[in-house]
Amino acid sequence: MQAVSATPPDPPPFRDAVHAALRLWHKDDDDHSPLDSLFLYRLRRRRAASNHQATNEVLYEGLESLALRYPASAAVLRMRFLDHQLAHAVANQLNVAESTVYATQKDALDRLADTLLTLDQQARATRQSKVEGRLEPLSFGDLVGIDGHVASLSKTLLTEGPPFLLALEGIGGIGKSALADALLRHALSYATFDDFGWVTARQVSFLGGGIRPVAKPALTAEALIEALLAQLTADEPLPGALTPPQALEALQARLQQPHLIVVDNLETVLDIEHLLPVLRRLAGPSKFVLTSRHSLFFEPGLRHFVVPELAPQDALLLLRREAGLRCLGAITAASDDALQPIYQTVGGNPLALKLVIGLSCALSLDEVLANLAAVRGRKAEDLHNYVYRCSWEQLDQPAHEVLLAMLLIAPRGGVKEDLVAITHLAPAEVGDALETLAALNLVDYAQGDLHGKRYAIHQLTRRFLEHQVLGWRH
């Protein structure tokens, strides 16, 4: 496991590395590559037969790009190193002095080094942009208290060989999806995997604009295979429609090159029972990260990680950070002793802590603590529902309508205009409602685009609305 440096090498040393690589063009010295600091090289090395081949492929790509801007520089380097011509022979061909050839070569090496660094940055940026487009919205902001988990679990993911399945388990709101996201983003800095995928199970279907429960796995094996093929072959779509067995075969062939896939939110036993057999067939050398509230401890061949609650200091840090975002000065300035009752009731569940801070936007800290005292000691689901209900009671009718409309928004989030169309409220009313809901941590800002902010809701918020609010209304 070897990381690609977050910052490119300094030009002079890297220029020397490029020179050394060119001098090895015709030598079958495969012990190492002078270009092994490049992310671009590591991507090539995954498919090339040798270090030497991967190095030459990177050099050739760099020379092709250099020739577009500096054809004379590229020509000199080709003659000197690819054609293996001596300096005086190149000087005769170009009708210049030999010293001019050496001066041109020096400048050309600088330009080729700059070109390769630019190509390397473009390769990083392209991969990051492509992969981030597949991820769930970043609704959890800066993460707290997970650096150690990312470091230890990354050793499992970035090391070749088994285990090929990693199960992140824990109660709702504990941060399983956030940890999976952090692991995948961390792996982007390495060239261990050819590509990445993210598929999420959902517990409801949308039929005729309404919400219906499903009596089957939220994510079937066929849906998983279809979603992954769509992601991983977007740049080179498969010809024609495939039958389910053909789709499975195509995906298996694709995953023979190492990929990292997250299968998020396996919340039912049915999901697990239906998906595990196909995941076992697809895993190796590719690796899968699964998130679930259900323990997979008795399933063989998996590494299990129960996501722990935040430690007390991390929990208080999250409380203050969330309070600071909402200008709740009384909480950011409060002593640890004053905030301890929140931690003693809620524990280190990140979502519950965020909901408490959201509730503090409408109630005083004393009122919040009094409310929490009523549910101290209850299980996490009861606590979440209680805090959600307290928050729901602070909302006016437009905010109620907008929050319920979020159930009909795609999991990746939607824009304000989507909610206007669903609720038939005035744009200003929807805007005011979204501000209130965001302050209460009931709606999150998802990734924005050219059309403005996008909004999404947490899976547990969705569950509360489906099982609690809709139940009250029927």
Image (cartoon, helix red, strand yellow):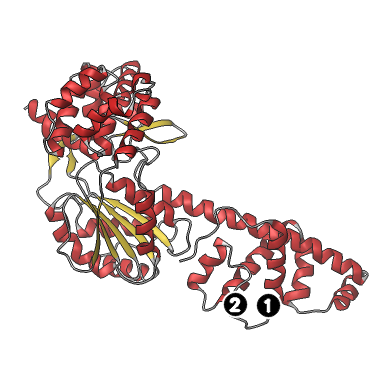
Q: Quadrant of residue 282?
A: bottom left
Q: Residue at x 16, y 57 (%)?
A: 272
Q: Earlier in the sequence, mark 1 or mark 2?
A: 1
Query: Which amino acid, mark 1?
Result: Leu
* Relative image position of residue 377 (x, y in whole percent): 12, 35
| Front residue (pair 15, 246) | 15
Q: Do the numbered discs 1 and 2 sit on residues whose CB atoms are within 8 Å?
A: yes
Q: Quadrant of residue 426?
A: top left
Residue named by callout 2: 52
- The residues bearing labels 1 and 2 have C-alpha atoms spaced at a distance of 8 Å
Residue named by callout 1: 24
Helix, strand or loop at label 2? It is helix
* Relative image position of residue 372 (x, y in whole percent): 17, 26
In the image, taking residue 76 as reference, residue 66 lies left or right, namely left
Q: Residue at x 22, y 59 (%)?
A: 222
Q: Quadrant of the C terminus?
A: top left
